[in-house]
Image (cartoon, rainbow, N blue to C red):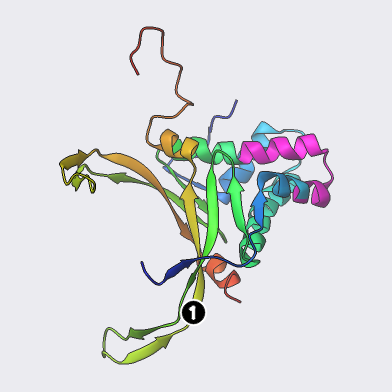
């Protein structure tokens, strides 16, 4: 059902993703598709900003980790500079996607009977 | 890294259903439609990554597939040397915008 026609070149942008939604759902206007795709990532960003984790089945999970304040160094001068505590987003790939990316995914055609796994 | 501590505040988790809810509220399609479109957005991304392509979401971050070469490893239990096969792994690099947003 979902194949990607136009955008080759090895990378997909948010714009390409919006165009793909328009292609798969001709009943949505271009504006709708844009609002939908933006809403997906905006809501994820907001969840992370609230310190929540995000779990997308079959895709992966996002967590916010805390880094303590530490003393850093200016690599040029060697001077000690304070680095403030901060929160860092992390992504952990889900099992299904991990396998698919590695070419072992369930999305592959089913093995014919007699194949050894 | 020792300076990384797993988040302990609020154990709330956002799921696909929450994203669907948000789109439903914002745009007013049926829940079924909203759920279908969210599902297919993630599927489109997965198909791309499966092919080894990059997915760049401005304001959020980039998903990139990296090829790992085989390397020597050791079974920490037995000390036995083993070869870890080459593989493709997915990494996410958060955008500056996302990093700034979660550090107000």
Q: Is residue B64 left or right of residue A2?
A: left
Identify the residue at image location x=23%, y=46%.
B77
- Residue sitting at the far top: A114
Q: Identify the magenta region.
A: B22-41
Which of these two is toward me, B30 or A10? Answer: B30
- Asked if residue B51 can be seen in this view, the reply is no
In what quadrant of the picture does the N terminus of chain A appear? top right
Closer to the camera in the image, B13 or B31: B13
Image position, residue B41 (x, y; %): 62, 41
Q: Residue at x 57, y 44 (%)?
A: A16
In the rendered view, would you say B96 is above or below A97? below
Q: Is residue A18 above or below residue B92?
A: above
Residue under label 1: A85
Q: Nearer the viewer, residue A38 or A68?
A: A68
Q: Residue at x 42, y 35 (%)?
A: A99
Helix, strand or loop at label 1? It is loop
Q: Is residue A3 above or below residue B98?
A: above
Is residue B25 magenta-colored?
Answer: yes
* Spot occupied by residue B28 in the image (x, y as percentages of width and height): 84, 45
- Chain letter for mark 1, please: A
Q: Position of residue A74 (x, y in %)?
A: 31, 86
Q: Residue at x 56, y 59 (%)?
A: B60
Tell me if residue B29 is in the magenta stretch. yes
Q: Is residue A108 left or right of residue A29?
A: left
């Amino acid at each position: 059902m979902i194949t990607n026609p136009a955008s080759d070149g090895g990378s997909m942008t948010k714009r390409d993703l919006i165009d793909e939604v328009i292609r798969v759902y001709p009943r949505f206007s271009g504006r709708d598709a844009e609002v939908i795709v933006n809403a997906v990532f905006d809501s994820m960003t907001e969840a992370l900003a609230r310190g929540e984790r995000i779990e997308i089945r079959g895709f992966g999970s996002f967590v916010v980790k805390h880094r303590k304040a530490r003393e850093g160094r200016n690599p040029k001068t060697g001077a000690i500079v304070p680095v403030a505590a901060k929160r860092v987003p992390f992504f952990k790939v889900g099992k299904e996607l991990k396998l698919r990316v590695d070419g072992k995914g369930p999305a592959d055609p089913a093995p014919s009977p007699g194949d050894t796994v | 890294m020792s300076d990384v501590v797993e988040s302990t505040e609020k154990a709330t988790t956002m799921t696909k259903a929450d994203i669907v809810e948000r789109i439903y509220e914002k745009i007013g399609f049926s829940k079924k439609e909203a759920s279908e479109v969210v599902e297919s957005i993630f599927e489109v991304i997965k198909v791309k990554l499966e092919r080894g392509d990059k997915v760049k979401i401005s304001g959020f971050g980039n998903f990139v597939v990296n090829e790992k070469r085989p390397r020597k490893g050791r079974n920490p239990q037995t000390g036995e040397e083993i070869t870890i096969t080459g593989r493709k792994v997915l990494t996410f690099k958060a955008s500056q915008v996302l990093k700034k947003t979660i550090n107000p």
